[in-house]
Image: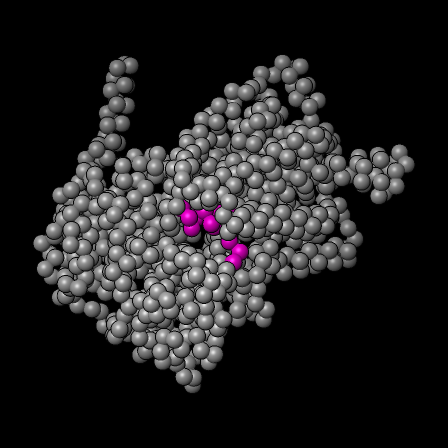
Amino acid sequence: MRWLALPVLLFLALALFYPLGRIVALGLGEGFGQALADPYYLARLGWSLAYGLGSSLLCLLLALPLAYAFRYRFWGRGFWLAFSVVPFVLPPLVVAMGFLALVGPRGALGVNLYGTPWVLFWASALYNLGLVLRPLVALLPLLAPPLAAARTLGASPLRAYLRVGVPLLAPALLSSGSLVFLYSFTSFGVPLLLGGPGWATLEVATYQALAQRLAFPEASALVLMQIGVSALVLLGYLRLQGRLGVGLEGSEAPLVLPRGSALGLGLGVGAFFTALYSPLLALIWRALERPSAWVSVWQSPSFTPGLLALQNTLLFAALAMLAVIPLGFLYAYAVWRGARGLDLLGLIPLMVSPVAVGLGYLLVYPGLRGSLLLLLGAYALLSYPLLARALLPALQSLPPRVLEAARVLGAPPWRRFVRVEWPLVRPSALSGLALALAAGVGEFGATLTLQRPEWTTLSLAIYERLGRPGAQPFHEASVLALLLMLLCMALLLGLRPEPPAAGRAHRSRRRGAG
Amino acid sequence: MYPNRWAFWLGLALAALAPALAQPPTLTILTHDSFSLDKNLVARFEREAGLRLRFLKGGDAGEMLNKAILSRSAPIADVIYGFDNTLLSRALEADILQPYRSPELASLRPELLLDQTFRATPVDFGYVALNYDRAYFKDRPLPQRFGDLAAPAFARLLVVQNPATSSPGLAFLLATVASFGEEGYLEFWEELRKNGVRVVSGWSEAYYTHFTRAGGDRPLVVSYSTSPAAELYYSEARPKPSEPPTANLFLPGSAFFQIEYVGILKGTRNLRAAQRFVDWLISRPVQENIPTEMWVYPARRDARLPEVFRFAEVPPQPARLSPQQIRQNRERWIREWTQVVLQGQSAQAVKARR
């Protein structure tokens, strides 16, 4: 089954390694060693590491107790779970505006966090909590039977948890924690907009060196530093995951609480999320402030009309899925069937600088200038890992006995896929797809090397308006930001957000049996 | 039966492809993100010239030019529009442009014609200038001289852009170099730092989050001399107020003169069309459309300005530096600025290391 990996490898080679390699090679001459040892860049590396590690620890610390709360049924449970990944796809400029409205120099809260690391960590939690929370919520109910077994065998609750619970949880914690690490370590927009110049990450420094100055030696040093660290982290994670990986079976639907407790829990969780997402509330308030902008945004003469931007957004996100779906499935299947090395390669899109890749495209594919193919390819590159990451754990937790049974009973591979595997991984696949789709809706702008005006998407229409002074452009931008948020939410809610993959499958099986 | 069916599908495919094959030749123009022109104007030019125009947005002016330089062996566009006089020397040195003497050159303001090799044709100009919030300064005195910005009375009032990431930020840095000289500009910035200047990465953060007009705490911002006019133009109040809520603060030497150019990229296969496009860009109808689309002044002497440009005043003593000076020192100025303003080193120490 290793051949499944071939198309993915080919795609990665064409869309990633070749262009990136050409850009890096341009800098590997004079000045490279100097840039590598530059104390300023070493300081960027240090801060990026601290930001990445701090962010993943923070997200894990917040997500663990929350995931326990999500074992129970309470009012708003599905909504918060779905909403937790919405910020992930919002353009950084929009989120930054929300933060500044709330905790900026004259923010509503009265504290000024601008230019401090605290606002960056808050932003990181707001962006990434969902990435950690959702897999944990899916996993925790599965822990109950093994923990109960340990207790029956005489272990104290603490001991049962440390010896059974923690090892079972560790792969998920490591896997989502390392994703958060990667996203924060390589983050661009938030540090650029909220940190002030003092808290630039490696990625911001790469952008300055490459896009603004074409300083290849410096950019190559930065790109290699970033890939080096990310690859080390990922290798460690893959090794640990290989050693710790344990299949889990059995599941529970959300537990029912007495009405009073459920109400209390719902209020508590709601309060936490409201606090976490308060910058987005500030944004909503701004968008609702001027009703006239809700009318003018659709046909303002000076800017891309809102409807065209909306159409483009949906069209491009949908087109990108044509590449994302096969890539995501092939990649997840190949890794599941034993192509472990691909696991690392497949994550490389998350650890490289889009600026470097984008400029590499110009260098190696000038014929594709401003073509849709280039845009969709670049976009697929950044969002197929989201689908694959969601699929992989679901595939890995498929009960082997069921697959063996299907094989023994003589089902050919395609039939096994259609009748057994697909129904079992469907919820995870859909939630991963929703994430990739929503990322396409929101994050298109960041990956574009060359944008054409007639292709303006929602996020680009927001940037366009924020490029002119005046009240009307500003309020229209706020309205579009709110629309973008609602659109992502609709996508994520609409495509079945409930993550307990195995849980659903088991429940339906139970229904079938009874 | 079968051959017929094949013929049918082939015919259908050809019919579907025919419009694509019959399309007029395409002229690709690489521009910066702020590019904008009236759609009807563009459509009329396309019809008359038998061309299709494709505009590629390449980021900030500097980023866009870098993309053109990077891809010079196989140019990604036929024409590049929007590089300014701070970047002119880089464009000329990279040798990516070919000469063209437009017959319309005679109608342009002579002071804009800096390139004697005719590879860069001026299209428009503007001024990076300080703006202030009128409401804030209603009962308070305004700074009178450029140096006043470092005075205690104006502490923590100013927000500027990082010159390493933003073109108005770079222009403002150049204005300080032109005003205070090689020796003095770092001291001025050191004083500004001690006086609580805030540095952000780009224009929109500075204007929309830190400027008091949009809810920030800084009533002074580095923007453009046309910004007050744009504020009035985009005002939502009905009836429109008679004056914009912001105004220019023209401290002598604090505004920086920017010229934007268009050039034909070497290696274009549409030379004739590219030349025609350049002529069109400096023709009167387009020039008169430029002010309210891109908020800069037209390069033509005979272009009429819109009424709202009453509030886009021209600074009396804008700073200027020659493209050669800028080319030779740009990197060093930015580096020294970073050391003094962002890394907190003393101007003295930085100058000692020169």
Q: Quadrant of the C terminus of chain A?
A: top right
For the point 39% across and 81% down, the residue is B142
Is A270 within the magenta? no
The front one of B154 and A35 is A35
Residue A296 appears at what percent x and percent y? 37, 62
Tell me: A396 left or right of A210.
Answer: right
Count the numbered circles shown. 0
Indicate the position of residue A20 as horizontal and vertical percent values.
Answer: 43, 36
Please say whether residue A203 is one of the residues in the magenta stretch: yes
Of residues A313 and B111, the one drawn nearer to the viewer in this rendering: B111
Tell me: A218 left or right of A117. Answer: left
Looking at this rendering, what residue extends furthest in the front direction? Answer: B352
Horizontal relation, residue B318 to residue A280: left or right: left
In the image shown, does A250 or B290 lie closer to the viewer? Answer: B290
Q: Quadrant of residue B221?
A: bottom left
**Which residues lie in the magenta part?**
A198-210
Task: Answer with the quarter of the image where residue A275 lies.
Answer: bottom right
Q: Is residue A349 visible?
A: yes
Residue in view at x 12 percent, y 52 percent: B102
